[in-house]
Amino acid sequence: MIDPVLLRENPDLVRRSQVKRGESSQAVDAALAADADRRAAITAYEQLRAEQNAHGKLVASAPKEDKPALVAAAKDLSTRVKEAQQAVTAAEQHAHQVLQQIENIVIDDVPAGGEENFTTLRTHGEIPTFDFTPLDHLEIGEKLDAIDMERGTKVSGSRFYFLKGVGARLEYALMSLALNRAVEAGFVPMIPPTLVRPEVMEGTGFLGQHSDEVYLLEKQDLYLVGTSEVPLAGYHMGEILDLSAGAKRYAGWSTCYRSEAGSYGKDTRGIIRVHQFNKLEMFVYTTPDDAEAEHLRLVAMQERMLQDLGLSYRVIDVAAGDLGSSAARKYDIEAWVPTQDAYRELTSTSNCTTFQARRLDIRYRPDGGKTQPVATLNGTLATTRWIVAILETHQQADGSVVVPEVLRPFLGGLAVLEPVA
C-alpha cells in the first residue's frame, strides 16, 4: 500500500497518480476521510484511557463512603473504553481496506494512458527476413515433434500443451542458461512453493483488478501463483532485513499458472498465451534510494540474454494504466515474432518501490535508525514463451532451427534442431 503519511501530506500527488493510471481520484478522498476517522477514534480512545487511569487512582485513594459511587463510575468508564477500543479497531480496518484500493504512486516520467500509450526507449537487431515463407512456432514445433497441443488439450483442456523431445530440452536449456547468469550476478537460486496463502497473494497486489486471472483452491484456501514473484515477496514477510552489505537478490525457478481471464480469442494458437508455463524470475529487496538503479540493472541482464539468443527486440516504458497495482514503473522487452509481424512481450521488469513491502511488513534499519519499508523489484530472465521467438527467428527453409550458440552447451552440443520424419 502507499505511505499514509504521503497521503496526508501530499494528497494531490496521489490524485495525479490515480488519474495518470486512468483510475478515479475519489479513492484518495475516501482514504483521507477514513484516515481522519481512524486518527480521531484513536484520540478518543486514548483520552478515555487517560481518564480511566486517573479515575482508578482516585478510587484507590478515596474515603470508604465515596467508593461505591466512584466504582460505579469506573464501571461505566470501562464500558466506554471498550466501546472506544472497538471503534478504533473498526476504523483501522476500514482505513486499511480503503487505503488498499489506491494503487502504487507512479514515477513522475512514466507515460500516461493505457496499453497502447507506451514509450519505445530503444530497439535492438534487424527485423529478420526470409527467402522462403516462414512457419509459425507451432508448425515448426510440430515438425520437430517438440510441441503437442492436441494431446495437451485432450489431457487438460484448451491452452495446455506438452513440450517433448527437443522442445522440453530447449526449455530446460533456456532456464539453465538464465539460472547460471543469475547466479553469476549474485542471485541466490530458489525453487519456491507455487501455492501461497491469501495474505501473500494480496500483499503482492495480485488480488486487485486482475484477481480473476488467479487460480484459487477454495478447500485449502491457497492460491496457485502466476509468477514466483509472489512467494519470493512473501519469503521475508514480517522481517527486518539487513541490507548493510547490499541488496538481497533471489532467482526463483517455478511453474506458473494463469487463468487468462478476459483474453478469450487472443493468441489461442500455440504456446504464447497458456494456462501453465515455466519461468525464472528475479526478485530483489533493496533500499528505496537504490531501487531505480537496480531496475536498470535487471533490464540490462534481460537484454544481454535476448542479444545472446540472437533475437530482435524493443524496450518499452509501459504506460501508467497498464502497470498493475503494485508497480511504480515497468519496462517490457518485446521480441519480434516474424509470422505475427509484430513485437511480443517476452519480459517484464517492475519497480514496486515500497508498495509490496508495506503490505507484507518487510523493513530494514538504515544506519541503525528507525525501521523503514524496503523496496522490491522483479523481472523475468527466461520463460516458456521465449521458445516462440527462438523457433521463428532461427528457422530454416527445410523446417530445421539453428540453436543459438549460448544454448548449445545445455543441449549436449546440438547445433541444429532437425524435423522428425
Image (spheres, grey):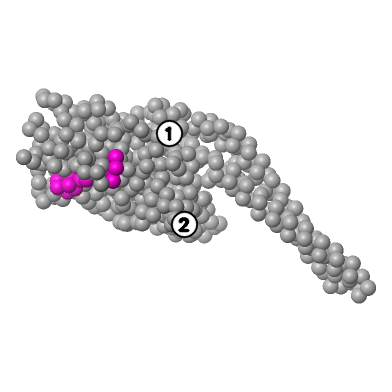
Q: Secondary structure at mark 1?
A: helix
Q: Pointer 1: residues within 10 angstroms few (<14), some, or many (20+)? A: some
In the foreground, 405 or 231: 231
Residue farthest to the bottom, as pictured: 64
Q: Residue at x 10, y 36 (%)?
A: 400
Measured from the top left, where is residue 250 in percent x and y? 35, 54
Residue 14: x and y in percent read 56, 36
Q: What secondary structure is marked by label 2?
A: loop
Quadrant of res 50: bottom right
Q: Quadrant of residue 48?
A: bottom right
Q: Position of residue 53 (x, y in %)?
A: 78, 65
Residue to which mark 1 is pinned? 322
Furthest residue in direction left, as rendered: 421
Q: Which residue is mark 2?
A: 237
> Is residue 108 visible in the rendered structure shown here?
yes
Side of 300 where 176 appears, left or right: left
From the viewer's perspective, tell me whether residue 44 is left or right of residue 175. right
The residue lying at 21 percent from left, 28 percent from top is 339
Q: Amino acid at mark 1?
A: Asp
Q: How many marks?
A: 2
Camera-nearest residue between 306 and 265? 265
- Work out whether residue 307 can be spotted: no
**Quadrant of image for the C terminus:** top left
Q: Find the magenta span and give its range.
A: 156-170
What amino acid type should be assigned to the residue bearing mark 2? Answer: Met
